Image (tube, grey):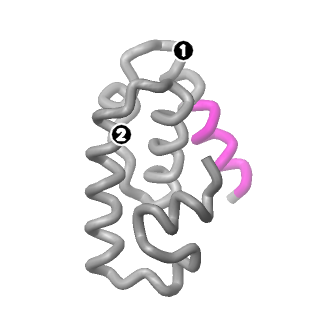
Amino acid sequence: MDFDDQLRRYFGTADQADIAPAAMEAGVERMRVDLGLETDRGRRFALWALLTMLGAAPDLDVAFKSREDQDAARDFLDMLDRQG
């Protein structure tokens, strides 16, 4: 999943500065629905990661049932923390 493609898909633009608050809210809601329906682990993780970067991700235990996926998500969060 390409970051810009996902922004275009859910928000209609690849430029975050151009996303109106109402469009952000609607796009995040669509992403959460897609996250709940997604069965592919990689796509699910990518959706969760994007939601995380937007400050709208569900808790790890809600988003991921497997311990392995939860650990990968924690690693991702640690990486984000290290980046500042």
Looking at the rendered image, the quarter that the C terminus falls into is: bottom right
Q: Which mark is residue 35?
A: 2
Mark 2 residue type:
Leu
The reply, left or right, for residue 36 in relation to residue 41 is: left
Residue stretch rendered in magenta on the structure: 74-83
Q: How far apart are labels 2 and 1 at the CA level?
A: 17 Å
Where residue 30 sits, quadrant-wise, is: bottom left
Q: Residue at x 39, y 25 (%)?
A: 39
Residue 43 percent coordinates (x, y): 51, 35
Left or right? Give the position of 82 relative to 62: right
**Furthest-right residue in view?**
83
Q: Residues within 10 Å of mark 2 (few under 14, many from 20)?
A: many
Is disc 1 placed on a helix, strand or loop?
helix
In front: label 2 or label 1: 2
Relative horizontal placement of residue 63, taking residue 6 as reference (left or right): left
Neighbour tally class for label 1: few under 14, some 14-19, many 20 plus, Cα within 10 Å: few
Residue 74's spot in the image, x, y percent?
Answer: 56, 31
Q: Residue beneath label 1, please?
A: 68
